Amino acid sequence: MSVAQSGQTLFVTTALPYANGPFHIGHIMEYIQADIWVRFQRMQGHRVHFVCADDTHGAPIMLAAEAEGVTPQALVARIAATRPKHLAGFHVSFDHWHSTDSPENVELSQDVYRRLKAAGLIYAKPVEQFFDPVKSMFLPDRYIKGTCPVCGTRDQYGDACENCSSTYAPTDLIDPYSTLTGARPELRTSEHLFFRLSDPACVAFLREWTAGSGAGGEPRLQMEVLNKAREWLGGSEGKLADWDISRDAPYFGIPIPDEPGKYFYVWLDAPIGYLASLKAYVGSGKAKTAGETRSFEQILSAPDTRQIHFIGKDIIYFHTLFWPAMLKFAGAPYKVPDNIYVHGFITFTGEKMSKSPSPASTAISSASTSISRAARRRSSRASSAARCRRACATPPSCGGTEGPPSSRGQRRTLSPTRTRSANSARCCAKRCASPIASTSASIRRSRGSSQRIRRAVTSCTTSARMRSSRFAR
Ligand SMILES: [Zn+2]
């Protein structure tokens, strides 16, 4: 990371924590990294606007609130109330903390959408998906279970089997049922809205943006991240699929203009929450108190402003493809990010720690608990964990094209004959998002121990499942 040139304005964000739970140690690690960087830049004489927000929308929040008998807003408010003491406890000083469930985010999300539509990059297409007739709602993949179509194991999720690690569409499940009501889901068709990410103009822009440098002259992406983005972008043939940006009611989200009963998929409005937080910061008068006299639009469009996002590697997909493309084709005053700074996960002997259920206030003390837990898990499946880590550390090239597991419209349904190697690629893409490739080769090398391989792949899939819940919104 470079020192910004003198006199620049830096608009800096960290990833927005999902509002269905308190901070975990991974959040705090990222905030401390970003806070140190921000303090250093300020010491160099730069003006920094450092903001964050709660990421509030999506089906999990809606269903959790319903289960508690409260409104989604009340659930989000309760979680949000836990934030300040943890931030203060770690001396992390954001200039402003906002919410994606805010007037600013509604205004900006709808504005970006209208601009993309005017640019010809939005279109409607019928999508067939499972519908819970008792709950009267379309079911995200994670809310469907059934019998694995490949190995016959019961009670498997709608996107992957924990026993044989096959991935498939929910419609491939045998005897599917809704995890919300137990009802047998019905296949129904609904019009969804798509962002034309595969448009040649989008692809050309992303090739240039991912490989280019920000206003500070530093490459926008770290080399490892650039490699991953290149895998998704593909070669001359192009690999990007269009992006399903709508969800049908009931859904806790932002209404799509002129589309009654349809809401933006949470991953459309979540990053726009960065901008909404900056806009609210300016609107609140706090920016002016800090010496910033310009409007939100003037700050964004000023040539000396740099836009910088700190994120974890699990959300590279959204920040290096959708987000810059949305901003580019929405046009001024929106600007594309100058840099995306990506960090990995906190691990102990290869096990990810950041999903510790303990809140950040006890992160330090809970670390020892997590370590003990990790050690027990490790000893109980030492060989499989070791196998899995070797796979994840394998250097690139299978061209892992898979994005987040629940991005509808991008799933590859695998034939049973492709299951083993394809799953290995998928596992690595999900677990560590690092460049992968020869995973299937390494699996072949170890074919003598098929039982170990199966356990290893399953363990990777389990980790991926823990993480994938954040995408199943
Ligand atoms: Zn199976």
Image: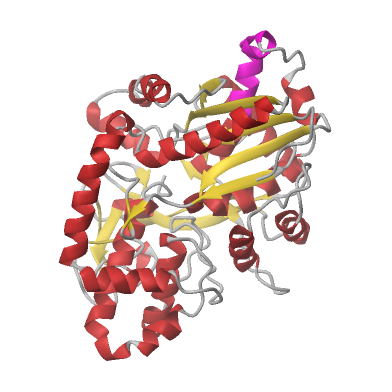
Residue that protrudes farthest toward the right in the picture:
303
**In the image, residue 274 above or below residue 231:** above
- Colouring of the image: secondary structure
**In the image, residue 59 above or below residue 374:** above
Q: Nearer the viewer, residue 250 or 320?
A: 320
Which image quarter holds the C terminus?
top left
**In the image, residue 258 above or below residue 216:** above
Q: Position of residue 202 (x, y in %)?
A: 73, 56
Whether residue 107 can be seen here:
no
Residue that protrudes farthest toward the bottom in the picture:
448
Please tell me which residue is depicted at 61% across the width and 18% down the height of the picture: 281
Q: Nearer the viewer, residue 129 or 337?
A: 337
Q: Nearer the viewer, residue 377 or 5?
A: 5
The quadrant in which residue 439 appears is: bottom left
Q: Position of residue 264 (x, y in %)?
A: 54, 39
- Decide whether residue 285 is among the magenta residues: yes
- Decide whether residue 22 is among the magenta residues: no
349 left or right of 117 in image: left
421 left or right of 298 in image: left
Residue bounds of the magenta highlight: 275-289
Which image quarter holds the N terminus?
top right
Please tell me which residue is depicted at 22% across the width and 69% down the height of the picture: 382
**In the image, residue 341 above or below residue 62:** below
Q: Position of residue 297 (x, y in %)?
A: 76, 24
Whether residue 459 can be seen here:
yes
The quadrant in which residue 380 appears is: bottom left
Prevailing secondary structure of the magenta residues: helix
Please tell me which residue is depicted at 69% across the width and 36% down the height of the picture: 307
Q: Position of residue 238 (x, y in %)?
A: 68, 69
Please tell me which residue is depicted at 53% across the width and 29% down the height of the picture: 52
